[in-house]
Image (tube, rainbow, N blue to C red):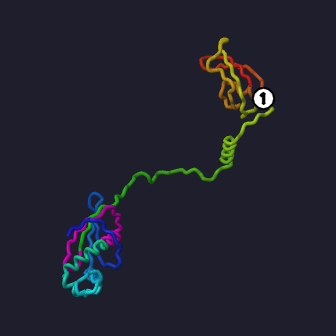
Amino acid sequence: MLAKGLFQGTVSFDVRMRTSAEVLEGNTVKLTVEVDESDIAEAEAQTLNRLAREVQLPGFRPGHVPKRIIQSRLGAKGIRDEVLRDKLSDYYAEAVEAEDLDVIVPPQLDITSGEEGGPVVFTATVEVRPEVSVPGYAGLEVTVPSPIATDADIEEQIDRMRDQFASLAEVDRPAADGDLVTLDIHGTRDGEPAEGLTADDLVYQVGTGGIVDGTDEHLVGVKVCDTFEIGAEDAPVGPAHLEIAV
C-alpha cells in the first residue's frame, strides 16, 4: 500500500518497534520501521473501542454496538486497515524522533508487510534539511569594541552634546580659538575684485583653517569692528590680497 500526505500526531502509547535510516541522494532518507505484533494487537483493541462508540447499527443504541458485531462485519483485514489509517502517522512520527531526523517535506509511505496480520513493516522516504558546511571559518577572529566607555569617550560625547545644544551669545572680549565670528571678506588681485574671495556676513569658527593660511592667527585677539589685511599666496587662481573686517 502506498500513501502520501502530511502526517501529524503524537504517539499516546509506548510502541515497541525497530527503526533504521538509510541516507539516499538529494538530502533524502529512507526510514524502515517494524512495529511488533503485540503493539498492533493493542492498537486493534483501541480501534475496536473507538468504533464501538462511533458506529451506528439498526437495533443497537449509539455507542453500544458489541465489539463482536463490528469484528464480524469488518473482518480481521478491515480492522487492520483501520489501525493502519489511525496509527501509521504515529509510528512514523516516533521513528523520525528516534532517528533524530529534521524532515522538511511530507513522507512517502510504503507498507511492505503486515497489512493482513503479523508485525507491520513500512518504509518512509522523506527529504531532510541539508547540513551546510562552511569551511575556513574556524580560524576567523572578531574583535568587538569594549562596551565600557573610557574617560575620553565620555568627554567626547559631552562635548558633542554641548555643541549640539549650544546657543550663541555675543561677548565683549577679544576673539579666541573656537569662537564664532562674523566676517566681511573682500579679496582683490592686481587691484581688481578677485572672484570667489569675497563674502559678507560669513560666520566662521576661529582655528578651523577654513580661509587662507595666516587668517586664524590674525583673528585671535581681534574685537568687533577691527579690520586687517593679509596676503593670500595660496588662493585659487593665484596670489591675492584680502581685507577682512570683523
Q: Could you say which is closer to the camera, residue 131 or residue 208?
A: 208
The answer to if 114 sits in the magenta stretch is yes
**Residue 50 appears at what percent x and percent y?**
29, 81
User: Residue under circle 1?
Assistant: 221
The quarter of the picture where residue 179 lies is top right
The quarter of the picture where residue 60 lies is bottom left
Whether residue 54 sits left or right of residue 221 in the image: it is left
The answer to if 212 sits in the magenta stretch is no
The magenta span reads 92-120
Q: Could you say which is closer to the camera, residue 67 or residue 112?
A: 67
Above-or-below relation of 185 to 129: above
**Residue 113 appears at what percent x and percent y?**
20, 74
The residue shown at (64%, 51%) is 149
The residue shown at (75%, 32%) is 176
Mark 1 lies on a secondary structure that is: loop
**Residue 107 appears at what percent x and percent y?**
28, 65
The crowding category of the residue bearing disc 1, from other C-alpha atoms within 10 Å (few below 14, some 14 to 19, many at least 20), is: few
Amino acid at the residue labelled 1 = Gly
Above-or-below relation of 133 to 244: below
The residue shown at (22%, 76%) is 81
